[in-house]
Image (cartoon, grey):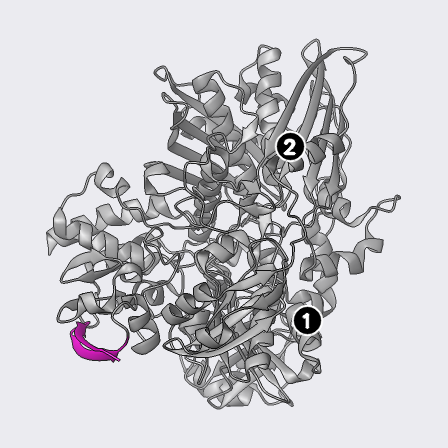
Amino acid sequence: MPQHTFTVNGRSVTVEAPDDLPTLWALRDKLGVTGPKYGCGINVCKACTSHLDGAAFNPCVTPVAEVAGRSVTTIEGLADGDTLHPVQQAWLEQDVAQCGYCQPGQIMAAAALLERTDDPTDADIDAIENVCRCGSYFRVRQAIKRAAELRRAR
Amino acid sequence: MTRFRRRAMLTLLVAAPTLTVAGELLPTAAQAAVPTLPQLADLVDLGDVLILAGAPTAHMLVLRVDTDGTATLRLPRAEVGQGITTAAAMLVAEELDLPLDRVHVELDDARPELSSSQLTGSSNAIRSLYGPVRRAAATARARLVAAAAARLRTVDLRTRDGLVVAGDGRTARYGELAAAAAEPSLLVGPVITKPDRDLRVIGTPANRIDARAMVTGQQRYTLDLDVPGARPTMVRRPPTINGRVAAVANEAAVRAMPGVLAVAVVATGVAVVAETFGQALDAKDALVVSWTAGTVDGESDATVSTRLRAAAAGFGGPPLLGQAVDAEFDFAFVSHAPMETNSAIADVRADRAEIWSALKSPVQVQSGIAQALGMAEDDVTVHVVQGGGSFGRRLFGDAAVEAALISQAVGMPVKLMWSRVDDMRHGRARAASHHKIRVVHALGSVLSLDHRVAAVETDFGHGVGDAVTANAEQLPVADDLAFPNIVFRTTVKSPYNFGLTNQSLVEVPMGFHTGSWRSVYSANTRGAEEIVVDEVAEAAGKDPVAFRREHLKTARQRAVLDKVAAEGRWGRAMPAGFAQGVGFHDEYKSCVAYLVEIDARDPRAPRVLKATCAVDVGRAVNPRGLESQMLGGLTDAISTTLRAGLHIDAGLPLEGSYSQFHYARQKDSPTDVRVFVMPATGDPGGAGELGVPAAVGAIANAYARATGVKPRSFPLVFPVDFEPYPR
């Protein structure tokens, strides 16, 4: 069985898995990193959204061999110790979550958006495709705008 | 799984359960509109029936105060996003005078002794818990005060922030008093909950108690639990509904695939247990299985429509007097599609079983699992896990039963996950329905409303169904109602004085996997009626808001409508292709109105741009949580009115994922949403499902006004714009 070494939330890990095993299952089933969620397995619901070398990616369709030697950040690694990321802080302020299941993906998508643009427009936010079946979209939108403010103020 | 870890005070509470069944009985007479006699749901609604069913055990709540000064409530309900754990914590914090962050809420395991009071449905959690949880917390507070009286040798005591404070300034912390307060011999004064004027926590917006866990990835759902030895498990399901395995051609080859640990044929298909879900998925897809026929293979959208149209009787010719506004509506099946697919963990041994799943009727599921495994109920432990959405779906415990049977078959603990395709095709759905509505009006007055609903049978084979059946004889109706009509008539009513009012349901049993979906019959039934209200207003030459105002039955309803019309700037000028629409709904002892603005310049690509909502739930325990529910109901209505539904082909939904089932995304959602919570006037009504029917009406009415097209078939934009997955 091939071995794959990569970084997860700043920690070097090695997993033994077939090359084509989706990274989502390497994270969840082999490493116990359960923040990224399964919702579809085909990169349409985006509940697993995490970061690969700082950019948003979807581990449900990314073979584990592709992340070897690279740096994966999941929702668990977004905060700096006890200091929440501005997106997480804004999510608390706006009380965005309902069932919460999609929110790790929503937050990671929002954090990646803010890395690309520090003042996102409504059109930029509309381009986030993550499904929230509880329908919290308006609060997600408000929280992204608030996170942009918090981030600019830091 | 949490046991009593610390030395604790345990109160098992005995307080008198109460039942209130009288609502506003009669419409006020001084109105031009033709009054309508009260309907059954005006007198006794489904929530009342469920409160009645749960009454004997509703007070059997476990609340403990620990030596660290925190309180923990074991809540016999499911949390699936609706915010009931936060609201329950607020009730405890209020009556115990303890800061909210020192109140914990844990979901109770299935407790068979609770019977129908351990049930989460019908927007009834707050209605059924408001009294019992407050009395539990008030009892705990009275015991702490009694313990403090003995210690401080004074009765001049009050409580604040987790302290008992004496008149001379001495204090005792709850944590210090917990053990003494648990002494059975303690003499305790009368237990009195706070009068409304003293409420400080109830009615004050609060954030979810689990919000930080959710934004940091620490919130645990069923498949995130680390149950020792439980392995990823998936099931290869039939290409039809209810097909059974005839033969597996390559079982040995699949067993030899990397990571595969076990393969077993079960009633629902072929289960594969593997080291990872990725490997379980590959292995179940590699199985070569032949199947027996399914039970609905001959059905499709066309056959469903034919059956439903035939089942709802027409109105014949024109009315004897007055003018008729007639309309017919069709609603497609809709998947519940919670983000967390159907899932459960089961560890079944020779003499006992332990189950973990998000369950809204866990007592009934425990009984079902015991029966399926051939065990006694006492040998089956069912843990209720916080769920990733429900919308009615988790009233059924099918994943838990399936996981238990697989664990028994393979002889190891299993972690069962349904794929998204399975969840959408083999899960449950809101039943398709057909509606024939006639409103007769003459000389500006509405004389009658007749609404005949035909729907594919909704499966109530869960805890709510059991509770209703057990209490049906206590309903104040002369005739013997068949089961679906009990639910229909205790939930569906018209808020308007429309003269002679008749709303009736004929259910057509067709063998589909259905289940009540947020607001059950009301989303379609009342949503369609709200469209007709606009059309009757137009026929009478009246403005839709003014017309509703003239016909609503109560001042409370009119206040909600007035609020939304004022805040939403009803009647403001809009460019061509844009329009406002309004909708109203009254249920669960609550009422709500939405006013939306839509951009339908392209009628095939409409977008709701703005929404205003006014809601009166009697008393909002957590206004911020209530706003979340109104936002969720709005998004559900945007989805199901405009684009989200299931196409049935040869018995199976074509849709298999969110790329095909078009539940709204961010780009479909309004950029401006405001929710106005009306001032408290009494005890809390229900809220979780309340928003959907009014929002359906508002969106459809806005679409009609923007496009000039009468909305009749839902969802309005519903092409098969995808290549279906192989069956």
Between the C-alphas of marks 2 and 1, the distance is 44 Å
Residue B10 point in image, percent of width and height: 57, 83
Queried whether the magenta region covers residue B188, the answer comes back as no
Queried whether the magenta region covers residue A10, the answer comes back as yes
- The numbered mark at residue B185 is none
Q: Is residue B167 visible?
A: no
Q: Residues within 10 Å of mark 1 (few under 14, many from 20)?
A: some
Per the picture, the main secondary structure of the magenta-coloured stretch is: strand
- Choose between B279 and A145: the one closer to the eye: B279
Give the residue at mark 2.
B554
How many marks overall? 2
Q: Give the image quarter of residue A112.
A: bottom left
Q: Amino acid at mark 2?
A: Thr
Nearer to us of marks 2 and 1 is 1
Residue B697 point in image, percent of width and height: 54, 30
Instruction: Tell me where the magenta segment starts and ends, as one range.
Output: A1-17
- Choose between B686 and B642: the one closer to the eye: B642
Residue B151 point in image, percent of width and height: 50, 89
Give the residue at mark 1.
B368
Secondary structure found at label 1: helix
